[in-house]
Image (cartoon, rainbow, N blue to C red):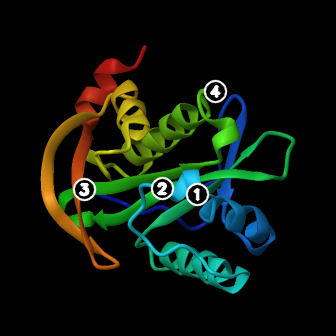
Amino acid sequence: MFKTPFDPFPNLETEQLLLSQLAEHHLHDLHALRTHPEVVRYLQRPIPKSLEDTLENININQQLVQKQEGIAWAITKKNEKKLIGVIGFWRIKKEHYRPEIGYLLLPEYWGKGIMSEAIQATLRFAFEQMNAHTVEADINPENSASAKILLRNGFKREGAFKENIFFEGVFYDSEVYSLLKSDWINAKP
């Protein structure tokens, strides 16, 4: 059976990272992340215009956790308080045992293995705690860095969709990547 074991909130720990619940004390760091032009370049979502917008995002994420409809983790390095990224599962399709993963990371931390480490921790949670059958990712095809990190973490490109996302008066293409639990298990060292 598919589960959403979000209460109590499941903090995750890796070799160099702590993944914890987004909270109001992350407000300024989260706002800097969600308004950074390089970070949001390929996102078809509204960019926060104010700290109040970012606080609303934190509140929405906390409500999703309470309703067991989604989960977002703040990514911090161990022994540091600064939020450097976020990762989570949205659009959880419980009937299909499939959450969709999404993530953001500040550019100064790109290329250092941080996002792969966070992805592996959340995949472990999805497959071992949620009993997911598949984890899916939906990305802008121009975001080659995101495609590469998904492929490095075992995902396979499943398909491309022409102009299937409409945002702010423009149609965008998307690509879907997925990772089956059986492939994840077989790839573990």
Pointer 2 residue: 41
Image vertical order of residue 75 relative to residue 96, above or below:
above
Mark 2 vs mark 3, CA separation in Å: 30 Å
In the picture, the disc for residue 97 is 3
Q: Nearer the viewer, mark 2 or mark 3?
A: 2
In the picture, the disc for residue 37 is 1
Q: Which kind of residue does numbered mark 4 sit on?
A: Lys
Q: Are marks 2 and 4 in contact (CB under 8 Å)?
A: no
Q: Which kind of residue does numbered mark 1 sit on?
A: Pro
Q: Are marks 2 and 3 in contact (CB under 8 Å)?
A: no
| Residue 143 placement (x, y as % from top left) | 38, 44
Q: Along the polypeptide, which appears first: circle 1 or circle 4?
A: 1
Q: Nearer the viewer, mark 3 or mark 4?
A: 4
Q: Are marks 1 and 2 in contact (CB under 8 Å)?
A: yes
In the picture, the disc for residue 112 is 4
Neighbourhood count class around disc 2 (C-alpha, 10 Å): few under 14, some 14–19, many 20 upward:
few
